[in-house]
Image (cartoon, rainbow, N blue to C red):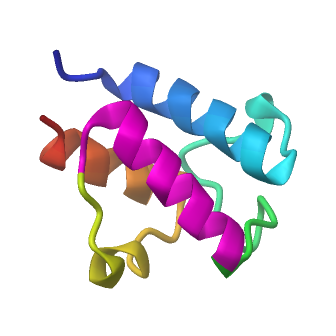
Amino acid sequence: MAATKEEIVSGLAEIVNEVAGVPTEDVQLDKSFIDDLDVDSLSMVEVVVAAEERFDVKIPDDDVKNLKTVGDAVEYILSHQG
């Protein structure tokens, strides 16, 4: 079953918390992974891999560079899952 927007935000918050140590409440739709959440390119790979497994999506490397904010990632997962 496809995840809802809220489930994706919550899941991404948990992933970013595990990977980068960012408090889950700081992971919001308008936050930039790099500028606001301090997720570097190596950590972003970990976030993407974890998100792919959790939400059953494939995120090609070419698309990762377009996922600048949490909202970008949520919309991408919503439109590509399952």
Residue 33 in sight here: no
> Residue 15 appears in which quarter of the rendering?
top right
Residue 3 in sight here: yes
Kindly identify the residue that appears in the image at 85 percent across and 35 percent down. 23
Kindly identify the residue that appears in the image at 74 percent across and 66 percent down. 39
Report the front residue among 42 and 77: 42
Image x and y of residue 36, in percent? 77, 63
Residue 1 relative to residue 70: left or right: left
Number of labels in the image equals: 0
- Give yes or no for residue 46 being in the magenta stretch: yes
Kindly identify the residue that appears in the image at 29 percent across and 63 percent down. 59
Magenta highlight range:
42-57
> Residue 5 appears in which quarter of the rendering?
top left
Kindly identify the residue that appears in the image at 19 percent across and 22 percent down. 2
Decide: is 45 above or below 27.
below
Image x and y of residue 8, in percent? 42, 31
